[in-house]
Image: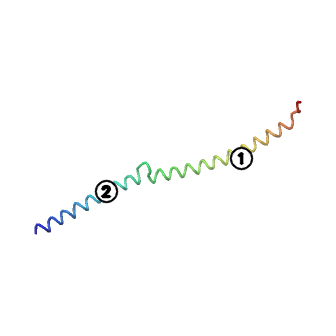
Amino acid sequence: MKLNLKIVIAIFLLVAVTIVFALYVAKLLFNGKNSLETYENLKTKKVQLEQEIKRLQKQNALLQKDYFELKNLEPENE
């Protein structure tokens, strides 16, 4: 009877430690420095930055066009 009680207690403690460890890992996964939330935020920021790059490239092209048009209007100084 005592042997069975010891086995039950050992199994209970093993299950309890496993649950605590699993909760700790889950907390790190969802709230830690390398969490899923951080990953999603970085993905969103990457998309925003890529859109900003495209906008700035278009703006730069227009400004370069204006610049070269204005430069061609100036008389050449020798």
- Disc 2: CA contacts within 10 A as few (<14), some (14-19) or many (>=20): few
Q: Left of 49 or right of it: where is 6?
A: left
* Badge 1 amino acid: Lys
Say which residue appears at 29% left-offset and 60% top-offset: 18
Res 76 → quadrant: top right
Q: Left of 43 or right of it: where is 32?
A: left
- Toward the front, the furthest residue is 78
* Badge 2 amino acid: Phe
- Mark 2 → mark 1, Cα distance in angstroms: 52 Å
Q: Secondary structure at mark 2?
A: helix
- Which is more foreground, mark 2 or mark 1? 2
Of 76 and 53, nearer the camera is 76
Say which residue appears at 70% left-offset and 46% top-offset: 57
Q: Position of residue 27 (x, y in %)?
A: 37, 53
First reached walking from the N terminus: tag 2 or tag 1: 2
Quarter holding the C terminus? Answer: top right
Say which residue appears at 68% left-offset and 44% top-offset: 56
Q: Position of residue 24 (x, y in %)?
A: 34, 54
Quarter holding the N terminus? Answer: bottom left
Q: Left of 68 or right of it: where is 9?
A: left
Q: Left of 48 or right of it: where is 29?
A: left
Q: Position of residue 73 (x, y in %)?
A: 87, 36
Taking 15 as reference, is 51 above or below it?
Answer: above
- Toward the left, the furthest residue is 1
What label sits on residue 21 in the rendered view? 2
Q: Which residue is mark 1?
A: 58
